[in-house]
Image (spheres, rainbow, N blue to C red):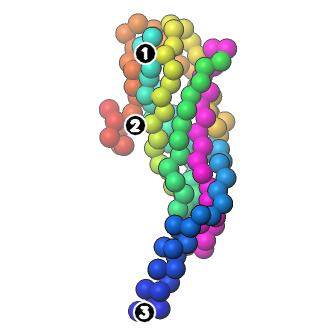
Amino acid sequence: MLRGLVLLVLLSAAACSDSSCDTGIVDLSEICLPTTAAPGATMVVDVRELCGRGCSGVPSCTAFLRNAQVTLDVEQDVCQETLTAECVAQRCEQRVVLCQLPALSAGDYTVVAPGGISRVLRVQNGGTSSCRFALDGGV
């Protein structure tokens, strides 16, 4: 039992160390987009990661508009600690992250995300300003 406690303390200390980290792109498996979005308002949508590394931090998402295309930039810091046997043995993380889209004028926009996801978002009067996955607390 003492050996296990010592191992736990050592692992905890390693997790708090100043290890090297790199920022990596996170592939997505799913984006929640409404049938139509409201024009002129920022929009909050859920995105789900495809297969996050065990022990890794929650990804972040930013979106930008360029030439009628909304590009989602989803990334996270991947640190040395995620390469331990314990972390590698964990199953894929499929966390849901909020992503704020910029205010868009009426029209159709292609939404592009890491992992090869590409969808069309129609923006018109009567649309909504958010999209949440039902099983993750959304509507």
Q: Quadrant of residue 112?
A: top right
Disc 2 or disc 3, which is closer to the eye?
Answer: 3
Q: Mark 1 = which residue?
A: 41
3D distance between C-alphas at marks 2 and 1: 20 Å
Magenta residues span 67-91
Is residue 93 found inside the magenta-colored segment of the image? no
Q: Position of residue 99 (x, y in %)?
A: 48, 33
Residue drawn where x is 58% and y is 39% of the image:
74
Quadrant that contains the C terminus: top left
What amino acid is found at the position of numbered circle 2 in the picture?
Phe
Give the residue type that dot 1 points to: Ala
User: Along the horizontal axis of the image, is 131 left or right of 47?
Assistant: left
Q: For this rendering, which residue is in front, 104 or 136?
A: 104
In reply to whether residue 84 is colored magenta, the answer given is yes
User: Tags 2 and 1 in contact by the CB under 8 Å rule?
Assistant: no
Camera-nearest residue between 80 and 69: 80
Q: Which residue is labeled 2 in the image?
A: 133
Instruction: Give the spatial CA distance, label 2 vs label 3.
Output: 44 Å
